């Protein structure tokens, strides 16, 4: 009898039970899910920050073109919230966006969309030639898939800020 107990004792010390293996697999899966979720959130956050910086830079370029009187025109940015293809255009004009010419069209990156202007709507920022001011303050909001948002505001005196 002593001989069989020794054999069982040695066997249980050398191998892992099915329960132990399942516990280890569960722990590894939980850690993996947490890591992927955290990393995914960081990627969306990074994309949102980058898109906000790009919009801010393009607004500043349009304002600078108006300040400089480039092509003897007024410059602006038109934001278009179209389902699945949100984009904005840098344009120049003598009067307004409808009479203007787009110099560049920029599409928002995958996973980023406008929440303001609202769906199927648009907004336009036109910088006054020479002064760089706008008629009214305009705020554009972009949003990532995980619902984080960034506001890009153009104040009446032409200052562009990201909030």
Image (cartoon, rainbow, N blue to C red):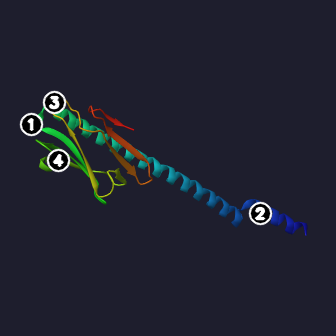
- Quadrant position of residue 162: top left
Q: Name the residue beneath numbered marker 1.
A: 71
Q: Measuring from the top left, give residue 141's x and y in whole percent.
A: 36, 46
Q: Which badge, 4 or 2, comes first in the chain's sequence?
A: 2
- Nearer to the camera, 119 or 27: 119
Which element carries disc 1, helix, strand or loop?
helix
Q: Residues within 10 Å of mark 4 (few under 14, many from 20)?
A: many
- Crowdedness of circle 1 by 10 Å Cα count: few (<14), some, many (20+)? few
Q: Secondary structure beneath disc 3?
A: loop
CA distance separating discs 3 and 1: 12 Å
Q: CA distance from mark 2 to mark 3?
A: 85 Å
Please report whichever mark, 3 or 1, sits nearer to the chain's N-terminal start.
1
- Label number found at residue 130: 3
Residue lying at 86% horizontally and 66% vertically, measured from the top left = 5
**Above or below, comparing residue 13 to residue 94 in the picture:** below
Mark 3 / mark 4, whichever is N-terminal: 4
Q: Is residue 144 left or right of residue 138?
A: right
Number of the front mark, 4 or 1: 4
Residue 80 shows up from this direction: no
Q: Nearer the viewer, mark 2 or mark 3?
A: 3
In the image shown, does 35 or 5 lie closer to the viewer? Answer: 35
Residue sitting nearer the eye, 35 or 106: 106
Q: Please say if 106 is above or below 7.
A: above
């Amino acid at each position: 009898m002593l001989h069989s107990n020794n054999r069982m004792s040695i066997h249980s010390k050398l191998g892992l039970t099915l329960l132990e293996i399942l516990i280890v697999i569960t722990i590894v899966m939980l850690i993996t899910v947490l890591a992927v979720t955290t990393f995914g959130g960081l990627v969306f956050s990074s994309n949102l920050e980058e898109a906000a910086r790009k919009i801010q830079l393009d607004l500043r370029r349009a304002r600078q073109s108006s300040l400089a009187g480039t092509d003897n025109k007024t410059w602006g940015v038109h934001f278009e919230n179209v389902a699945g293809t949100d984009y904005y255009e840098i344009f120049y004009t003598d009067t307004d966006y409808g009479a203007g010419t787009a110099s560049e069209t920029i599409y928002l990156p995958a996973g980023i969309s406008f929440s303001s202007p609202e769906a199927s709507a648009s907004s336009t920022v036109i910088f006054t030639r020479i002064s760089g001011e706008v008629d009214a303050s305009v705020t554009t909001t972009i949003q990532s898939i995980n619902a984080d948002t960034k506001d890009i505001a153009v104040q009446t005196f032409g200052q562009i800020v990201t909030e």
